[in-house]
Amino acid sequence: MSDLKTLETELLAAVEAAADLSALEEVRVRALGKKGQVSGLMKGLGDMAPEERKSYGQNINGLKERIGEALGERRAGLEAEDMAQRLASEQADISLPVRVGPLAEGRVHPVSQVMDEIAEIFGDMGFSIAEGPDIETDENNFTALNIPPEHPARQEHDTFYFGGQPDGSRALLRTHTSPVQIRTMRKEKPPIRIIAPGRVYRCDSDQTHTPMFHQVEGLVIDEETHLGHLKWVLEEFCKAFFEVDAIKMRFRASHFPFTEPSLEVDIGYAKVGDELRIGQGEEWLEILGCGMVHPNVLANVDLDPNVYQGFAFGVGIDRLAMLKYGMPDLRAFFAADLAWLKHYGFSSLNVPTLSGGLSS
Ligand code: DAH
């Protein structure tokens, strides 16, 4: 009996002394495990007289129970201590700002964003995207567009020329996106419906002109397209682009060698403080040139002007971006100024869609 008492005292002390959960588990195995001390005592029962066996057995069970209870209590205590310690050491400060990755930090240039917006709008109307090179031939940039050598329109373009070739030809930096009309009509059969966004170059620089800027050309050729279609397409474009249903537009007679008749389009706006309000007020700003493709241009690309007709337009993208997003100085577009880009640029995840709202 006193053996049992001693063992109990010893085991209870060991339980109490266990400093952590794994030490406690060792005590449990040592006491109550299959080969543990208490199980060892059970083995002796077989040799005892029945009376003795009964009371000794009861004592062992009592011991077992008390040790089990002590183990349970100690385990609960240790677990609570453990939890308290983890709560103290694993604190997260949820008031800290999220660390931003490069994808969230980078910005899409407003010109790229506006090009995507334009592509989205015309894509919805069934136009596809065409491209041409920045370095063009004189033929594509001028002659085929009904601007022959010595034509006064050539002077207006302030062209950057490359050195002359032995055959007398000179390559140039395209002065507008209109040569993509020529390339497209030479390559594809009507019906044609394309837009061609890209860089263009003119030897000019002040607050509203930079030597490189951006245009988007539009071209539709088939057998029955007329001026009414042109007007509708441009109205729909302006409404969608400026996200204003009540857009004010003015079509003015103009002159371009490659269209007949030719028109220029102005957008009505009001200036309230520094802000431009599109669709209100009495001010007008020219945003594009357009017209019905000149029969000479069709003939130059071997399309019969008696069969085919269509319209074309050319829009200044930088100017559209300035108007829509209220950026006053064109030169800032090309200054590679990070602060400016952070302010006016767009998140790369902000992909313009008509369904989602172009600029939202
Ligand atoms: N290419 C002209 C320019 O850069 C703009 C233009 C006017 C394009 C009328 C066109 C058009 O396609 O029909 O000034």
Image (spheres, rainbow, N blue to C red):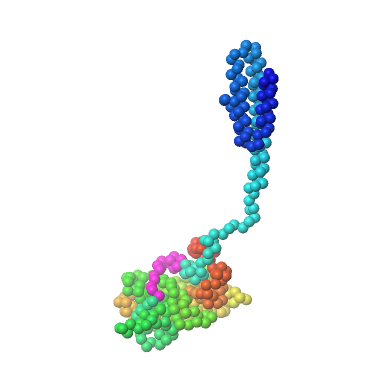
Q: Where is residue 19 drawn, in percent x and y?
A: 66, 36
Q: Where is residue 220 drawn, in percent x and y?
A: 38, 72
Residue 352 visible here: yes
Q: Quadrant of residue 152?
A: bottom left
Residue 311 visible here: no
Q: Where is residue 256 drawn, in percent x and y?
A: 41, 82
The residues colored magenta run: 119-134
Residue shown at 47% from the left, 79% from the top: 211
Residue shown at 62% from the left, 11% from the top: 49
150 is higher (above) or lower (below) than 314: below
Q: Where is residue 268 drawn, in percent x and y?
A: 54, 77
Q: Quadrant of residue 282?
A: bottom right
Residue shown at 45% from the left, 68% from the top: 119
68 is higher (above) or lower (below) than 195: above
In the figure, is residue 126 to the left or right of 343? left
Give whichever of 1, 88 is nearer the camera: 1
Q: Is residue 131 magenta?
A: yes
Give whichever of 221, 28 is nearer the camera: 28
305 is higher (above) or lower (below) than 152: above
Residue shown at 65% from the left, 47% from the top: 89
Q: Is residue 123 magenta?
A: yes
